[in-house]
Image (cartoon, grey):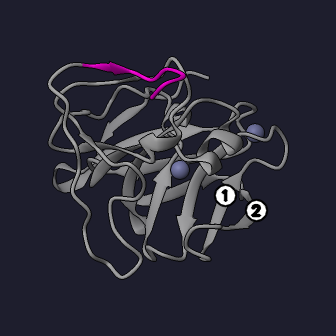
Amino acid sequence: MTEDTTMTGHAGHSLHAGGCLCGAIRYTTDGAPLRVTYCHCRFCQRSTGSAYLIEPVFERQKLVLTRGTPATYEHVSEGSGKRLTINFCGTCGTKLFLEGERFPGFCNVFAGTFDDPNWFARTPENSRHIFVDYAQHGTVLPAGVKLFAQHAIRLDGTPLEPVVHDQPRTIGPRD
Ligand SMILES: [Zn+2]
Ligand SMILES: [Zn+2]
């Protein structure tokens, strides 16, 4: 597939394209992510089959499906009791984005599905790691970035205080 990954639209909007492995589902996002979450929770580990999910967050209306319609799977979070909807390709199984009942109007893109997954910045200001209590052994948590043991926000909406390390930290059996 040789589609442009970056197209400049009207009024300085910048569109970034992504899609699934087989190409049946394609999408674009408009503008920079509101923030970038690295999530180490068990839901993200199990659903990706990997150590953590990198999820740039957008207003849902900034994500436009340009080809195909994703299948959906609804999971009820054990922690919050709220629904999480995984949007995935029914043909090849690639997961594309999440929508959460807890944060209506927003979506979290599976960063690896962008044609260029490095197009957006990941800075100490815009990114954070959450659920680091569940990070897998061998995971390296960077220095200078906000780390949250679990969620960044309590169910009642109260923000929680992050920890910031001045040295990178590797998760091991004793952490
Ligand atoms: Zn597919
Ligand atoms: Zn997670």
Q: Is residue 83 above or below residue 65?
A: below
Residue lying at 26% horizontally and 33% vertically, measured from the top left: 122
User: For the magenta stretch, what is the residue range?
Assistant: 168-175
In terms of secondary structure, where does tag 1 sit? strand
- Left or right: where 4 falls relative to 90: left
Rounded to the nearest angstrom, the CA distance separating label 2 from label 1 is 5 Å
* Mark linked to residue 86: 1
Residue 39 can be seen in this image: no
The quadrant of the picture occupied by the N terminus is top right
Foreground residue among 95 and 68: 95
Q: In this view, does 38 lie above or below 153?
A: above
Please tell me whether residue 172 belongs to the stretch shown in magenta: yes
Label 1 environment density (alpha carbons within 10 Å; few <14, some 14–19, many ≥20): many
Please tell me whether residue 106 belongs to the stretch shown in magenta: no
Q: Magenta-highlighted stretch: main secondary structure?
A: loop
The image quarter containing residue 106 is bottom left
Position of residue 77 measured from the top left corner of the image (x, y, whole percent): 63, 67
In terms of secondary structure, where does tag 2 sit? strand
The quadrant of the picture occupied by the C terminus is top left
Foreground residue among 155 and 64: 155
Kindly identify the amino acid type of the residue bearing the numbered disc 2: Tyr
Residue lying at 43% horizontally and 26% vertically, measured from the top left: 116
Residue 161 can be seen in this image: yes
Residue beneath label 2, please?
Answer: 73
Kindly identify the amino acid type of the residue bearing the numbered disc 1: Ile
Residue lying at 76% horizontally and 62% vertically, measured from the top left: 73
The image quarter containing residue 4 is top left
Label 2 environment density (alpha carbons within 10 Å; few <14, some 14–19, many ≥20): few
Position of residue 104 measured from the top left corner of the image (x, y, whole percent): 46, 77
CB atoms of marks 2 and 1 within 8 Å: yes
